[in-house]
Amino acid sequence: AKQVKRGLAAAFTKFNEYALAKYNQSAAKVKLRDVLFMCHACPKDAEQAELWKRVAANTLATPDTWEVALSSGADKKDTFTRLITEGKLGYLALLRNLRNMTDAGVDRDLISKALLAGAKGSKALPFRFVAAARACPQLEPVLDQAMQLAVADTEKMDGLTVVLVDISGSMDAQLSGKSDLSRCDAACALAVLARAAFKDVRVFSFSTSVVEVPARNGMALIEAISKSQQHGGTRLGQAVADIHRLCPTAKRLIVMTDEETEDTVGGPIGEGYMIN
């Protein structure tokens, strides 16, 4: 599609050699050079034009990543320490490798400083920090601080916003076979983001009843939602009706749910959003 080609062409101009080499998988059916040829991207300057010639010729410099270093037999502790110190470990890679780093004996203060230094502007979503805390619980306090720094830059919207989080039994199912997180974990993490995105927020959980959650932030909010009531049945329709009664002046209602319910769901007052 023409618009997809235009989007890909625009995206290509944002990547340096390191990023292109990192994702230029030799075993992939469709390689970056194929995409470059198909979308007819225009380089922004001569330097980028030379870079794209290396993409086309498959002569990009080997990226200095933890995967490349460890696959060559480098020491795990030394590799992660060097990449963090040199600022070459991406923030998501940092979050995903906390257990590897702590098991290898990387200095915990170095890891903590990197987590806090890179959080602001990382655009990492709260569930990433929740997953990292599950993998490395000893770092949860600093991960909590980092998560709140990551969402702090979110532009805040006016008007009372009600966040309604489903914690029924079905929400305890895992997100996928490869994930340590449940649907409930993901929904609660989104509530953390919502808390940062709106100036006036009230958070409720629902299962067989509706319970308002204390005005907390970060990991404390996630725990408060998850433990606010038993994870039982799902009465979403009744929950929406209760919110209309409890918050009649709300500008918007945001529901985090797997969309299983035992009753009929009516329309929202004001703006309504259902996030599956």
Image (cartoon, rainbow, N blue to C red):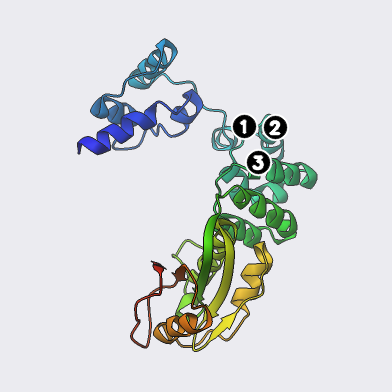
Category of crowding for the residue at label 3, using alpha-carbon neighbours closer than 10 angstroms: few (below 14), some (14–19), many (at least 20)? some
Q: Quadrant of the N terminus?
A: top left
Mark 3 touches mark 1? (CB < 8 Å): no
Category of crowding for the residue at label 2, using alpha-carbon neighbours closer than 10 angstroms: few (below 14), some (14–19), many (at least 20)? some
Residue that mark 1 sits on:
88
Report the amino acid beneath label 1.
Answer: Lys
Mark 1 touches mark 2? (CB < 8 Å): yes
Looking at the rendered structure, the secondary structure element under dot 1 is loop
Report the amino acid beneath label 2.
Answer: Arg
Kindly report the distance in space between the C-alpha atoms of the residues bearing marks 3 and 1.
12 Å
- Of callouts 3 and 1, which one flags the residue occurring earlier in the amino acid sequence? 1
As rendered, which of 110 and 142 lies closer to the eye?
Answer: 142
Residue 230 spot, x, y in % from top left: 57, 86
Label of residue 82 in the image:
2
Mark toward the viewer: 3 or 1: 3
Determine whether, in the image, residue 102 is placed left or right of residue 42: right
Is residue 145 in sight in this rendering?
A: yes
- Of callouts 1 and 2, which one flags the residue occurring earlier in the amino acid sequence? 2
As rendered, which of 67 and 200 lies closer to the eye?
Answer: 200
- Of callouts 2 and 3, which one flags the residue occurring earlier in the amino acid sequence? 2
As rendered, which of 72 and 7 lies closer to the eye?
Answer: 7
Residue that mark 3 sits on:
118
